[in-house]
């Protein structure tokens, strides 16, 4: 009996030790991504804008993607790129565009990844200043309108305001 107990302890102990050392990272659950995307889309629709909204993980994978009826075909790539860029750089795409305009030597950032879109409408999604995702809106008639809709998405899930 003692031998079986010792064997059980030896088998269980490494698993417990390894599990305790695994890192954990915050992420945006699917339900929250959908809620944010839907709020952004509805805000745009109320204003008569036919847009697409994308929410990406911190690593840039699509979590949620909504395309309004009769929105332009380009709006999907725009929304995805803005969400990816905001999540990747941890900055709004409007602020990134402004930074590049002020320091032209930073224009090479556009070439780091083909998914990067440097136009207003992408916001990082943060909770307590920790980035977990990005949201992007593409297709509204102005940069300000894209941003307004994206901010509605943040508000819907009580994320930090950008």
Image: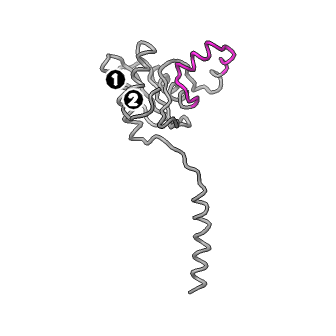
State the mark number for residue 56. none
- The secondary structure making up most of the magenta span is helix
Q: Could you tell me which residue is drawn at 39 percent across and 29 percent down?
A: 153
Asked whether, in this view, residue 3 is left or right of residue 61, the answer is right
Foreground residue among 92 and 51: 92
* Vertical order, 36 against 45 (above or below): below
Residue marked by disc 2 = 153
Instruction: Return the x and y of residue 96 as percentages of the image width and height.
Output: 57, 20
Instruction: Tell me the colour scheme of the image.
Output: one colour
- The local crowd at label 2, few if under 14, some if 14 to 19, many if 20 or more residues have their Cα within 10 Å, is many
Q: What is the tally of numbered marks visible in this picture? A: 2
Q: How far from the left and from the top, in percent, is residue 90?
A: 56, 30
Residue that extends furthest to the bottom in the rendered view of this protein: 1
In the picture as drawn, the residue positioned furthest to the right comes out as: 105
Q: Which residue is mark 1?
A: 43
Placement of the N terminus among the 4 image quadrants: bottom right
Q: Position of residue 2 (x, y in %)?
A: 58, 85
Under tag 1, what secondary structure? Answer: helix
Report if the CB atoms under discs 2 and 1 are less than 8 Å apart.
yes
Q: Does 38 sit left or right of 13 as displayed? A: left
User: Marks 2 and 1, how far apart in space?
Assistant: 9 Å
Eyeballing the image, is 11 above or below 94? below
Q: Which residues are magenta?
A: 88-108
**Direction front: furthest residue:** 128
Where in the figure is residue 109, as x and y percent of width and height? Answer: 64, 22
Going from the N terminus, do you reach mark 2 or mark 1 first?
Answer: 1
Bin the neighbour count of mark 1 within 10 Å (Cα to Cα): few under 14, some 14-19, many 20 and up: many
148 falls in the magenta region: no
Element type at marker 2?
A: helix
């Amino acid at each position: 009996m003692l031998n079986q107990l010792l064997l059980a302890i030896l088998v269980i102990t490494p698993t417990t030790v390894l599990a305790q050392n695994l890192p954990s990272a915050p992420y945006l659950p699917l339900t929250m991504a959908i809620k944010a995307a839907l709020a952004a889309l509805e805000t745009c629709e109320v204003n008569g804008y036919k847009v697409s909204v994308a929410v990406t993980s911190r690593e840039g994978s699509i979590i949620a993607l909504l395309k309004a009826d009769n929105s332009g075909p380009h709006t999907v790539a725009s929304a995805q790129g803005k969400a990816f860029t905001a999540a990747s750089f941890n900055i709004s795409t409007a602020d990134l565009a402004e930074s590049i305009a002020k320091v032209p030597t930073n224009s090479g950032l556009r070439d780091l990844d083909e998914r990067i879109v440097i136009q207003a409408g992408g916001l990082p999604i943060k909770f307590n200043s920790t980035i977990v995702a990005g949201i992007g809106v593409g297709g509204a008639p102005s940069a300000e309108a894209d941003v307004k809709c994206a901010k509605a998405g943040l508000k819907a899930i009580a994320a930090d305001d950008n």
